[in-house]
Image (tube, rainbow, N blue to C red):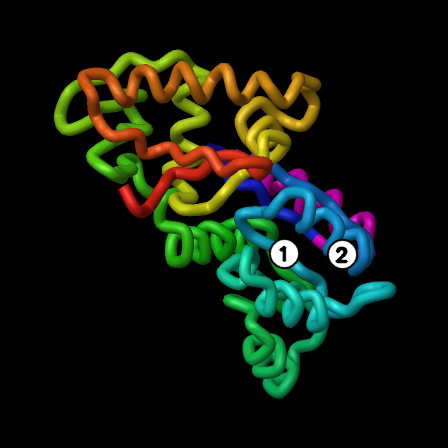
Amino acid sequence: MTPYILVVDDEVALLTLVRYNLEKDGFEVGEAVDGDEAMMMIGERRPDLLLLDWMLPRLSGIEICRRVRRAADTQNLPIIMLTARGEENDRVRGLDCGADDYIVKPFSPSELVARVRAVLRRLRPAFAAETIEYGGVAMDLAEYRVSRDGEALRLAPTEFRLLRHLMENPGRVFSREQLLDAVWGREIYLEPRTVDVHVRRLRRTLNAGGKPDIIRTVRAAGYALDRQR
């Protein structure tokens, strides 16, 4: 699954530069220009990493960082602070509020991309791995193969992407709308029940031969890869 990076900065030229370089390196990018918009976007779709400017209109980067760390569903969200503040006390304050890394403006695009990849490797190892394993299921992302308990499985491309997204976030409940955005893309409109159809197909393949179901249906909420099974 392509990592989704939310960039929050009120400098439009900088947003354009950062977006261009991240997309060129294979990331999916969202943009917000003030603190309120950033919190709304995080609530609608949790990013895999937050690039957050210190000085923002309406809600500061420091306050966003604090709120993200206080919320149960985002407390482990990787955060890199972007700021013109270069004094040691400011860097310490940013890290103390919960940031995982700190980049002082101006910075080179190549450094920014390298730091993003380094934080993702450290905090979200699934994005760096070529193989993901969970509950006896193994996904070889390089060769596009899936197996369960050593037995090869055949998945359609959509079911492969769906399973990968769930395996990269085990235990987290995703709504149908969140899965549509993550697996099909935000530009495509599909009925939420489309997710149910593909989950049924995925379950049929994964559970062949009477194997236990590792996909949990959460009533009125969505689906999760169940840690308890």
Residue at image coords 23%, 16%: 208
Kind of element beneath mark 1: strand
Segment colored magenta: 8-27
Type of residue at label 2?
Asp
Q: Residues within 10 Å of mark 2 (few under 14, many from 20)?
A: many
Kind of element beneath mark 2: loop
Residue 9: assigned label:
2
Asked if residue 224 is positioned above or below residue 72 in the image, the reply reads above
Residue 131: assigned label:
none
Q: Which residue is mark 1?
A: 51
> What is the quadrant of the C terminus in the image?
top left
Asked if residue 53 is positioned above or below residue 182 in the image, the reply reads below
- Give how far across and how far down residue 73 sits, in percent: 55, 56
Residue at image coords 68%, 63%: 106
- Give how far across and how far down residue 37 sits, in percent: 80, 52
Q: Earlier in the sequence, mark 2 or mark 1?
A: 2
Based on the picture, tell me whether residue 16 belongs to the magenta stretch: yes
Quadrant in the picture for residue 213 = top left
Quadrant in the picture for residue 133 = top left
Based on the picture, tell me whether residue 220 belongs to the magenta stretch: no
Q: Is residue 88 left or right of residue 139?
A: right
Q: Residue furthest bottom?
A: 89
- Give how far across and how far down residue 25 sits, in percent: 53, 37
Q: Is residue 134 left or right of residue 70?
A: left
Q: Is residue 115 left or right of residue 38?
A: left
Q: Is residue 200 visible?
A: yes
Q: Are marks 2 and 1 in contact (CB under 8 Å)?
A: yes
Residue at image coords 42%, 44%: 169
Main SS category, magenta section: helix
- Give how far across and how far down residue 12 sits, in percent: 82, 49
Q: Is residue 162 left or right of residue 91?
A: left
